[in-house]
Image (cartoon, helix red, strand yellow):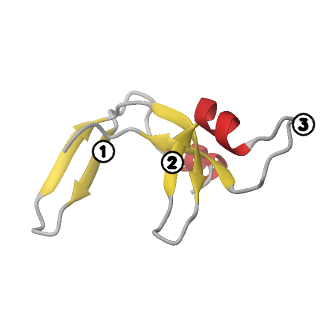
Amino acid sequence: MTVKELIEELKKHDEDTEILITSVDPTDYTYINDFGGIDLQYFIDDDEGGYLVDEEDYEEDYIDEDGDDDGKGKKVLVVNGGYC
């Protein structure tokens, strides 16, 4: 989902509606958490499915001295759903 798509979806709802984050584990137990915020991170796709790094680590590890990005990271917004 893109930011634009999220904004369009949120426009369909009352601004005072509370947001909760849910996820289901393999036993079908549903976890319900408060919305914990949004972080800008970089998704690095690798052979094991990928991982996230924050902006500071991305700049240190993936941008060279000339400021060139190696193109391995995709900028993403990550919704923090708390701990399960």
- Quadrant position of the C terminus in the picture: top left
Residue located 32% across and 40% down the image: 81
Query: Which of label 3 and label 1 is nearer to you?
Result: 3
The disc, 3 or 1, on the residue closer to the chain's N-terminal end is: 1
- Numbered marks: total: 3
Q: Position of residue 5 (x, y in %)?
A: 61, 53
Q: Amino acid at mark 1?
A: Ile
Classify residue 68 as left or right of residue 74. Answer: right
Tag 3 residue: 66
The image quarter in which residue 37 lies: top left
Q: Amino acid at mark 2?
A: Leu
Tag 1 residue: 21
The disc, 2 or 1, on the residue closer to the chain's N-terminal end is: 1
Given contact means CB atoms under 8 Å apart, are the residues at marks 3 and 1 in contact? no
Tag 2 residue: 52
Query: Which of label 3 and label 2 is nearer to you?
Result: 3
Given contact means CB atoms under 8 Å apart, are the residues at marks 2 and 1 in contact? no
Q: Amino acid at mark 3?
A: Asp
Q: Is the residue marked by circle 3 packed among few (<14), some (14-19), or many (20+) residues within 10 Å?
A: few
The disc, 3 or 2, on the residue closer to the chain's N-terminal end is: 2
Classify residue 13 as left or right of residue 5. Answer: left
The foreground one among 48 and 28 is 48
